[in-house]
Image: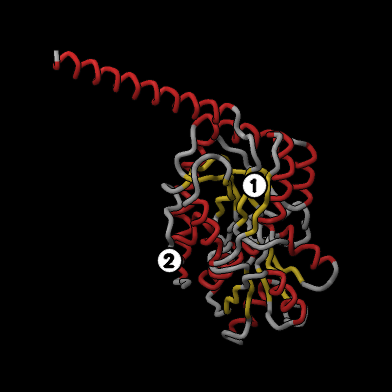
């Protein structure tokens, strides 16, 4: 009789465990099917006013309307984007903390920085590639150069005198400068800014010499005469600045373009990823968004989730090589 009692108790415990497991599974499935049911935080790895911030705010506005929830843009600048990326890598994979994976945070920084406390591949769910954009080399007009050949000649005569700004070590403007140093054989000094707006103020004043910043941000300052454009960092001309030749016309083979994609913490449920990918695809197909991005000089580059995951792995290898070849490093 005692043995039967034990069996019955064990059976009842098993049934209770199954019931609890089923309830939890149902609860999780229900949460996923109703996602999102509260505001989503979109963590931006750079300060307000940067290209990344501009893209994020256009995207967040449209995504929020599609999902029926507020998308709260949270600028978390610092350490070239590593602070932001690490905070997202450590967040719960419930879809309520999202970010941009970028050519800096997920392709350059793991090699550039000695202590990166996240794995750019394993610690994230890479959802959708969104846009890419060329960088533009623009100088303070006081610098005696009107084209790339003259700038390179001036740099060789004055090693270490020219300085270039970026929003932090590992960002594409930093890497664009390092690539030019390597390929043109010149000595120019990198000056990173936590707040790039202060960097622009110093650039306009002539305290620093130049920048390899993104076309959407820097070109308006070229048009108003505060800066002089010498080249774009891609092999083809920018559609919004067709008069500016590629740097590659002077430095053969020079080609570098940053990119931005949607990502979240590793382990996000598949159906949630699919919902966000579908919504992102809709945002990128929106005529208003397309026109806005085109005017900003951005190139929409949609991919499937699998393609984006493969792309991230390839880009990590590509940008890491640029860092190693240049000898660049950051603390």
Q: Is residue 106 left or right of residue 172?
A: left
Q: Secondary structure at mark 1?
A: strand
Q: CA distance from mark 2 to mark 1?
A: 26 Å
Instruction: Say whether residue 157 is visible.
Output: no
Q: Give x and y (percent) for residue 165.
A: 64, 73
Residue 127: x %, y % from top left = 54, 40
Residue name at image x 61 percent, y 81 percent: 155
Q: Quick check: can you spot residue 193?
A: yes
Residue placed at 53% from the left, 29% from the top?
A: 271
Disc assigned to residue 210:
none
Which of these two is toward me, 175 or 284?
Answer: 284
Can you tell which quarter of the image residue 11 is in?
A: top left
Left or right: where 323 falls relative to 16: right
Taking depth in this image into account, of 198 and 260 the one nearest to the observer is 198
The residue at 53%/61% (across/down) is 83
Q: Is residue 20 above or below residue 245?
A: above
Q: Which mark is residue 131?
A: 1
Q: Position of residue 25 (x, y in %)?
A: 44, 26
Q: Is residue 224 above or below residue 271?
A: below
Q: Quadrant of residue 184?
A: bottom right
Residue 28 appears left or right of 160: left
Nearest the eye: 157 or 178: 178
Look at discs 2 and 1 and give the one toward the viewer: 1
The residue to which callout 2 is attached is 324
Q: Where is residue 28 shown, x and y percent of the image?
A: 49, 29
Residue drawn at (83%, 65%), measured in percent from left and top?
223
């Amino acid at each position: 009789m005692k043995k039967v009692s034990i069996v019955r108790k064990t059976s009842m415990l098993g049934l209770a465990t199954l019931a609890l497991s089923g309830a939890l599974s149902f609860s999780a499935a229900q949460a996923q099917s109703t996602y999102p049911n509260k505001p989503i935080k979109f963590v931006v790895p750079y300060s307000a006013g940067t290209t990344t911030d501009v893209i994020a705010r256009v995207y967040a506005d449209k995504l929020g309307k599609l999902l029926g929830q507020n998308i709260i843009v949270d600028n978390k600048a610092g350490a070239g984007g590593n602070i932001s990326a690490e905070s997202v890598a450590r967040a719960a994979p419930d879809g309520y903390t999202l970010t941009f994976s970028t050519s800096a945070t997920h392709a350059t920084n793991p090699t550039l920085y000695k202590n990166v406390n996240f794995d750019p591949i394993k610690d994230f769910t890479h959802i959708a590639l969104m846009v890419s954009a060329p960088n533009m080399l623009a100088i303070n007009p006081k610098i005696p150069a009107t084209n790339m050949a003259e700038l390179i000649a001036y740099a060789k005569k004055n090693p270490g005198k020219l300085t270039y700004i970026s929003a932090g070590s590992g960002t594409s403007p930093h890497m664009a400068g390092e690539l030019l140093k390597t390929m043109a054989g010149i000595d120019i000094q990198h000056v990173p800014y936590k707040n790039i707006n202060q960097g622009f103020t110093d650039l306009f004043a002539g305290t620093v010499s130049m920048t390899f910043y993104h076309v959407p941000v820097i070109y308006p300052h070229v048009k108003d005469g505060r800066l002089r454009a010498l080249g774009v960092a891609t092999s083809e001309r920018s559609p919004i600045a067709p008069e500016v030749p590629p740097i590659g016309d002077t430095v053969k083979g020079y080609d570098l373009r940053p990119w931005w994609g949607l990502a979240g913490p590793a382990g996000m449920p598949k159906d949630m990823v699919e919902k966000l990918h579908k919504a992102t695809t809709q945002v990128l197909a929106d005529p208003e968004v397309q026109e806005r991005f085109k005017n900003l000089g951005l190139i929409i580059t949609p991919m499937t989730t699998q393609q984006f995951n493969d792309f991230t792995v390839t880009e990590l290898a590509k940008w890491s090589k640029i860092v190693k070849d240049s000898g660049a490093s950051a603390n």
